Every structure is written in C-alpha cells, then in structure tokens.
Image (tube, rainbow, N blue to C red):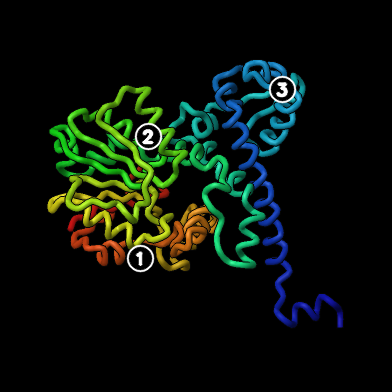
Amino acid sequence: MSETTTTTAIGFDHGAAEDFAGRMLATLNAGALATMTSIGHRTGLFDAMAGMEPATSAEIAERAGLQERYVREWLGAMVTGAIVEIDSEAGTYRLPAEHAASLTRKARPNNIAATCQWIPLLGSVEDEVVKCFERGGGVPYTSFDRFHDVMAEESDQTVVAALLDHILPGIPGVVEALEAGIDVLDVGCGSGRALHLMAETYPRSRFTGYDFSEEAVAAAQREAARRGLGNVRFETRDAAELGATERFDLITAFDAIHDQALPDAVLAAIARALRPDGLFLMQDIAGSSHVHRDVEHPLGTFLYTVSCMHCMTVSLARGGAGLGAMWGVETAQRMLAEAGFGKVAVTSLPHDAINFYYTARK
C-alpha cells in the first residue's frame, strides 16, 4: 500500500495540512512585521515618511536622524510586508497616505503602530513566562522594562483621546457634575494621563490617582507639577486597600481591574469608597468568559497572548487570582454584583474595538 493511500485511509487531509502550514508561514511574517512596525513607531520613521515625496534610504535616514544602514534594512521589511512602496529603478521609497493613516502619531487614536509595541515587549519576558509554565508563579511588573511607556500610549489612544468627546458625555449627568465639582478617584492610574486631562478640563473637581507602581506614580506627579495642576494628586497604593468609605462621587478604572492580584477585593473596596449616589466607570477588555465564544473575536489571539504574557502572570506573581485580560463580560458582571453593585450597564464605543465600558451603581 502506498504512503498516500495509508495516510488517506486514516483520515489525514494533505490539503488541510498544506493550508495550515501556509497560514503558519504567514503568521511568522506577520509577527516579524509587527516587530519592525514597532521599531518604525519608536524611531519616528513612519512620522518622518508621512507626506514625504519618494526618497532614498539615505534621505529618509537623514530626515529621521537615524543611521542609513539600519533604515535601509528596515525598509526591506516594510517593502516585503507591503507597508512601504518601492521604485526599484529610482531606488526610492514611499509611505502611502492610506497606510500612514494607521501608522503615525498624527493618526491618534488610530495608530496601530503604537499597539504593535506589545509584541516585542511581551517577547522580552518569554524566558520568564516559559519558566512559569514549568514551575508556576508569575512574572512581576518589574520584568517589563517598557510597560508603563507602552501602556501610557495605549491609554492615550483608547481613553484620553476619547475621554471628553465620547466616554464621559456618554454617561448622563457626569459632565455636569464634573463641571460643578466632585471628588474623583482613578484606580490603577498608571502615569496619570486621563487624570491630567480631567483635572485641566474640570478645575472645580478634585482628582486622586492610585497605582501600586512607584515609577508610574512618580511620572504622574512630575507631569502634574509641569502642568501646574493643583486639583490632582497621586499616591502609591494597593487598590485592594483603598482605605476609604463613601469618599468619592466617581471612581474610574481604565483597563486595570483584570490585572489585580485580588480583583474581588478591589471591586469591594471601590464599592465602599463610593458615596451612596456615586458611579463606578470601568473600562475593560471586551470578551466572553467562554473561550469558544471568542473564536470570532477580531483581536482574540492578540488579547489572549497579552493576557498570558502580562495580565495573568503579573497577578500570579503577587500570589493573586490570575484573572487575565479575557475574564469576560459574564465574569465581570458577576463580580460587580458580588461587590455590591446592583445596577450595571455594559456598552461599547465606536472608537474602541478592544474594550467594554461598564457603569455601575450600588
């Protein structure tokens, strides 16, 4: 019996195997392209090339203030990845405006190049994550050298860019209350970009930011001082120990709850810290608590990867629950109810394909 006949008899589909191998090769290229796209963002190459007439690698390097040899090799990845166009006869390169619309800082909040930074960032802790697969435990925040920089840019796109035009106006009465003057807390504030903007926009309100990262809090404090903001303060504190009862009118948590070591304790602390008529606004990853329902999620693979290599592992590193980014709307609603929130609404916003927005009251 021939080999072909044997493998067919046991149900091996050669066509499906070839298709899958092709898909994996495409995945290899896509992963490499994401890394080079991150470099294009960090070095400012996309910003330099946007609107630039077709130019040589030397001209592009000069405009960006970079070394030509590295720029030339980077351009090779951009050309073969169909991001940059090449004129082989003239030896020039061009970034189409249609591509720049998703790759430059001016494209905010649609700058996908900024989000591509997650791929090399997560790759930097691969060895530590592999060890956790073998022995358990987690990888601490301190192992992610650029986490706060990348997270700040991500927050700038999904939160800060839409905060005044979409997020806050979408909640009845919140803008009016902020204008009149209320007490606001941001849990897991990071470097404080959302609070800086709110403090500038609503000078009658009082803002507080808590984060357990001393590095992030220090950065937030420096920026608040630079802007001369007297109505915002930042403090290094574990979110599970807010130490407040009926103190705040509005508490926000932007993409922060699922990272917590004790998310149930954090939600309960938030409920206690709210005044009787207070509101909790939680932005968190849009997903289901059932993986089979995430198969059609346009960013499902990316989000589960970020969860495995960051969100889940940093929680486990602190002896936590390891909830993970893809805890899902069902689990989120259950945990909010258990924390004492009797009224919870879940919405999505057009600018943000990654997150749900929860408004919760006691």
Of 75 and 203, nearer the camera is 203
Apparent side of residue 62 relative to residue 359 in the rendered image (left or right): right
Q: Mark 2 — residue?
A: 193
Q: Which mark is residue 164?
A: none
Amino acid found under the numbered disc labelled 2: Arg
Q: Residues within 10 Å of mark 3 (few under 14, many from 20)?
A: few
- The reply to whether residue 149 is visible in this rendering is yes
Q: Is residue 35 above or below residue 362?
A: above
Q: Residues within 10 Å of mark 1 (few under 14, many from 20)?
A: some
Apparent side of residue 248 relative to residue 88 in the rendered image (left or right): left
Separation of residues labelled 2 and 1 (CA atoms): 28 Å
Q: Provide the secondary structure element on which disc 1 rests.
A: helix
Whichever of callouts 3 and 1 sits on the residue coming sooner in the sequence is 3
Amino acid found under the numbered disc labelled 1: Thr
Quadrant of the rendered image containing residue 130: bottom right
Amino acid found under the numbered disc labelled 3: Gln
Q: Provide the secondary structure element on which disc 2 rests.
A: helix
Separation of residues labelled 3 and 1 (CA atoms): 50 Å
Q: Residues within 10 Å of mark 2 (few under 14, many from 20)?
A: many
| Residue at the image position 55 percent from the left and 59 percent from the top | 138
Q: Provide the secondary structure element on which disc 3 rests.
A: loop
| Residue at the image position 47 percent from the left and 66 percent from the top | 291
Apparent side of residue 292 relative to residue 270 in the rendered image (left or right): right
Whichever of callouts 2 and 1 sits on the residue coming sooner in the sequence is 2
Q: Mark 3 — residue?
A: 67
Q: Is residue 349 above or below residue 320?
A: above
Q: Mark 1 — residue?
A: 331
Q: Quadrant of the C terminus?
A: bottom left
Separation of residues labelled 3 and 2 (CA atoms): 33 Å
| Residue at the image position 14 percent from the left and 42 percent from the top | 173
Q: For the view shown, which residue lies furthest in the right direction? A: 1
Residue 351 spot, x, y in % from top left: 37, 41
